[in-house]
Amino acid sequence: MKSTAHTITSLPPSPDQERRKRMIEYGIMMGIRVLCVLACIWVRGWWLLIPALGAVFLPYFAVVVANATQSGARGSVERPGGLARREDDR
């Protein structure tokens, strides 16, 4: 039976760490949206389209990013099997 050793770096982040990271990303995107809304006041002409689109579509992307959780091989932790006595320990 071959056992695999798990290191602390192979474990997924704790739920609190993952939630904090997603909240920071959401806050940054909403900050950029506020800047887009404020830019709509001063920008004129066709350039107004860029901050207007940012102000409209950034909330959608911010929510998608905030609700996305980490998945994949790195996030999986296997349940250990039962204990077995080695024959050379006697």
Image (cartoon, rainbow, N blue to C red):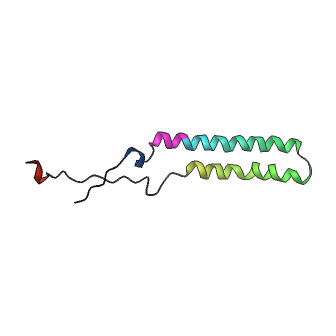
In the displayed structure image, the side of residue 69 where residue 1 appears, left or right: left
What is the residue that sits farthest to the front in this orientation? Answer: 88
What is the residue that sits farthest to the bottom in this orientation? Answer: 1
Q: Magenta stretch containing residue 48, yes or no?
A: no
Q: How many marks?
A: 0
Which residue is depicted at the point 43% across and 57% down?
A: 73
Task: Report x, y in % for residue 12.
Answer: 43, 48
Task: Report x, y in % for residue 54.
Answer: 76, 50
Which residue is depicted at the point 34% across and 49% down?
A: 6
What is the residue that sits farthest to the left in this orientation? Answer: 90
The magenta stretch spans which residues?
13-20
* Residue 27 or residue 87, whichever sits in front: 87
- Name the main secondary structure of what is drawn in magenta: helix
Task: Report x, y in % for residue 1.
Answer: 22, 60
In the displayed structure image, the side of residue 50 where residue 65 appears, left or right: left
Q: Magenta stretch containing residue 14, yes or no?
A: yes
Q: Is residue 2 above or below residue 67?
A: below
Which residue is depicted at the point 11% across and 48% down?
A: 89
Task: Report x, y in % for residue 5.
Answer: 31, 51
Which residue is depicted at the point 58% across and 41% down?
A: 23
